[in-house]
Image (cartoon, rainbow, N blue to C red):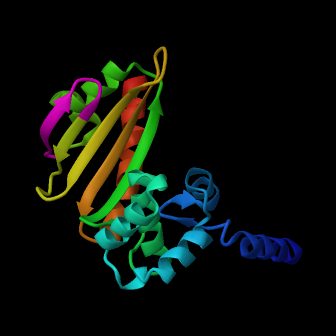
Amino acid sequence: MIEMSKKAAKKKQKTGGSLRKFGGISDEATRKATGRSWGQWLKILDKAGARKMDHQSIAAHLEKHHPEVGDWWCQMVTVGYEQARGMRQKHEKPGGFEISGSKTIAAPVTAVFTAWQDAKTRRRWLAAEAITIRKATANKSMRITWTDGRTSVNVSFYAKGMGKSQVSVQHGKLPDAKAAARMKTYWAGKLDGLKALVEG
């Protein structure tokens, strides 16, 4: 075990942090998409004075000086940098904390969407949560104001071939890391319940 730890440490040092993840994205994925490792991005942004910048300023700097990366990756690199430098906690976004979860279900996407949209069916797996559906696009997406009246839930539905689908949930505007961790666990359990109901 000691020998393996030494090898891992050497690999980490050589690659500039290849064993780490920031913003939920691995060093390998970052290098493949942007041409640079997390270690390289940290050095670049440190040199640019990003420790003293807010989120918007860091993203704007990347968009101006590294346009080849693209808007989405500029945002992801910014979030990763903020986490790496202690400027942002896990799950923290500019508008609060946000968690996500997904579940693949052996049922048509229409059945999964109905389990969310139909109030009677929804009560069978989401209990008595009083939610407000602000907008729904059949078999595609749903925008929800959560029972607390403050946080929001975005749900996406995907057809995955014959009799198979996937549902993805993003719960945003959560007040702190504790609430984010609690809702991460909550949604994992609820999506398991949804899967059992629809498949059953």
Q: Which region of the structure is painted magenta?
A: 128-141
Residue found 24% across the figure and 69% down from its top: 175
Residue 40 screen position, x and y as percent:
60, 71
Up-down relation of residue 43 to residue 146 (above or below): below
Q: Is 191 included in the stretch rendered in magenta?
A: no
Task: Give the vertical position of 105 relative to 97 (above or below).
Answer: above
Q: Position of residue 46 (x, y in %)?
A: 49, 81
Q: Image point 17% across, 51% down: which residue?
A: 146
Residue 8 position within the rendered picture, expressed as x and y whole percent measured from the top left: 78, 71
Residue 187 vertical placement versus 51 (above, below): above
- Is residue 130 at all visible to an observer of this figure? yes
In terms of depth relative to the viewer, which is nearer, 136 or 86? 86
Q: Is residue 128 visible?
A: no
Q: Quadrant of the C terminus?
A: top left
Q: Which image quadrant for residue 115?
A: top left
Q: Is residue 114 left or right of residue 75?
A: left
Res 55 quadrant in image: bottom left
